[in-house]
């Protein structure tokens, strides 16, 4: 059985594809040539399961999406007190490239260009060369993604050639003693950071690493301290979407970061990372279709951090009883999208080849809409593969048992299964 999650993600893309609002970032020549119709989405669970739909393998440069990760690296290297000496943590209320600083001459947060240039200059210390600093950042981001990432030198050069505003920011920072490098070297180092190339799967995994308290969910490597992830997500939640951050948190409700190449990532702490790519931007510099995708996912999956909907706090499968002919999967807790994904992944990986399969919902406390939908679609796919599927539901938790093809999920009793009857 193939999991229905990629199909669900493809449906989301189909809903937003007709939206052709916004424009590509034409102030950077290389970005101006982007195909505006490219569209992709990826999701990575905290357990390291990656799903995508659309242009999942299309590479693009991180741009400002690199900022929270390099901020996390600086926090990991130097600690919060040292980082706060040169950059604040407050929303700016201004454009990302505004030529302004706070009253103490520090950039107000690390996710606007001035703050990101300062944070970049912290890495490897003030005596680092551009080459060594950039390699430290590239290597760190590669560990976050779980593969070796590369710098798109063509995009980098295009940005350096048109970097007058960032050079102005660097001169201003240097005049107040906030950075020590020459303005040119500071901007070159920062631009190379922004020119690291990724796809939506990479970003989803990197985002899930923040969600997972610093443990890379695919490789298992512990990269960041949990406190560093918490601080980074907190800054993302208030500053990640520039002067649209307040509206974003009200409507979508998850920490996020955008980039002018068209990428957008979001992190639901403890559960998953999500990334999208679509090059058309709104006036705030955020992907138009990307924002729409996140709104749909947030509403469907109940991802809003301020949602009062219950979230599951335990692994959803209690145990599995199985013979060559039949299997019962005992579920527990509240089944939302994340829990349903874990159940479907377990079913897919279990190599179940028997003729009968049942899911026992006796210890399930409830479902949200997407959790119920995912499980019903999974059962339908098993049945199409020739498996006799049913649910054991003595508390009637699985209301509305109609599947997507209009047929009903059969309800069974434990005694209908030999393995349950034997008490194994």
Image (cartoon, rainbow, N blue to C red):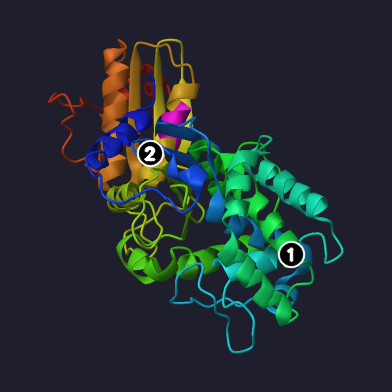
* Mark linked to residue 80: none
- State the CA–CA distance, disc 1 to disc 2: 43 Å
Query: Which secondary structure class fits the magenta region best?
Result: helix
Instruction: Give the residue displayed 25% in from the left and 45% down from the top.
Output: 369
**Residue 2 horizontal/vertical position (percent):** 39, 21
Q: Earlier in the sequence, mark 1 or mark 2?
A: 1
Instruction: Give the residue displayed 58% in from the left and 51% down from the top.
Output: 159
Q: Are marks 1 and 2 in contact (CB under 8 Å)?
A: no
Mark 1 burial class by Cα count in 10 Å: few <14, some 14-19, many 20+: many
> What residue is disc 2 on?
340
* SS at mark 2 in the image: helix
Instruction: Give the residue displayed 26% in from the left and 42% down from the top.
Output: 16
Q: Say whether residue 274 is left or right of residue 22.
A: right
Instruction: Give the residue displayed 14% in from the left and 23% down from the top.
Output: 407
Whether residue 392 can be seen here: no
* SS at mark 1 in the image: helix
- Image quarter where the N terminus lies is top left
Q: Quadrant of residue 174?
A: bottom right
Q: Is residue 43 magenta?
A: no
> What residue is disc 1 on?
121
Q: Residue furthest left?
A: 406
User: Does 420 sit above or below residue 25?
Assistant: above
The span shown in magenta is 342-346
**Residue 282 horizontal/vertical position (percent):** 33, 57
């Amino acid at each position: 059985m193939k999991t229905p999650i990629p199909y669900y993600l493809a449906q989301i893309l189909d809903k937003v594809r007709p939206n052709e609002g916004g424009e590509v970032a034409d102030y950077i020549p290389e970005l101006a040539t982007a195909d505006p119709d490219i569209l992709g989405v990826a999701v990575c669970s905290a357990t390291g399961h990656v799903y995508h739909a659309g242009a999942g393998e299309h590479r693009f440069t991180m741009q400002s999406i690199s900022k929270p990760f390099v901020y996390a690296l600086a926090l990991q290297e130097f600690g919060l007190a040292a980082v706060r000496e040169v950059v604040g943590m407050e929303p700016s209320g201004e454009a990302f490239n505004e030529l302004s600083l706070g009253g103490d001459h520090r950039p107000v947060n690390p996710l606007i260009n001035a703050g990101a240039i300062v944070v970049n200059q912290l890495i490897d210390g003030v005596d680092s060369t551009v080459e060594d600093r950039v390699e430290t950042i590239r290597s760190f981001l590669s560990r976050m993604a779980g593969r070796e990432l590369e710098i798109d030198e063509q995009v980098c050069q295009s940005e350096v050639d048109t970097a007058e505003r960032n050079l102005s920011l660097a001169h201003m920072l240097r005049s107040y003693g906030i950075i020590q490098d020459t303005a040119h070297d500071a901007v070159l180092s920062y631009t190379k950071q922004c020119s690291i190339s990724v796809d939506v799967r990479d970003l989803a995994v990197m985002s899930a690493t923040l969600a997972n308290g610093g443990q890379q969910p695919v490789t298992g490597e512990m990269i960041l301290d949990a406190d560093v992830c918490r601080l980074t997500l907190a800054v993302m939640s208030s500053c990640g979407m520039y002067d649209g951050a307040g509206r974003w948190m009200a409507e979508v409700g998850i920490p996020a970061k955008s980039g002018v190449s068209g990428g957008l990532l979001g992190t639901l702490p403890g559960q998953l990372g999500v990334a999208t790519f679509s090059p058309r931007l709104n006036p705030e510099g955020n992907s138009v279709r990307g924002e729409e995708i996140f709104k749909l996912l947030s509403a469907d999956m109940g991802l809003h951090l301020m949602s009062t909907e219950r979230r599951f706090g335990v692994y959803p499968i209690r145990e599995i009883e199985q013979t060559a002919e039949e299997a019962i999967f005992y579920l527990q807790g509240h089944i939302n999208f994340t829990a349903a994904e874990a159940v479907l992944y377990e079913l897919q990986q279990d190599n179940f080849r028997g003729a009968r399969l049942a899911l026992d919902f006796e210890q399930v406390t409830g479902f949200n809409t997407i959790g119920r939908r995912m499980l019903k679609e999974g059962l339908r796919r098993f049945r199409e593969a020739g498996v006799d599927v049913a649910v054991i539901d003595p508390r009637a938790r699985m209301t509305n048992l109609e599947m997507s093809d209009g047929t009903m999920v059969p309800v069974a009793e434990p005694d209908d299964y030999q393995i349950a009857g034997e008490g194994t």
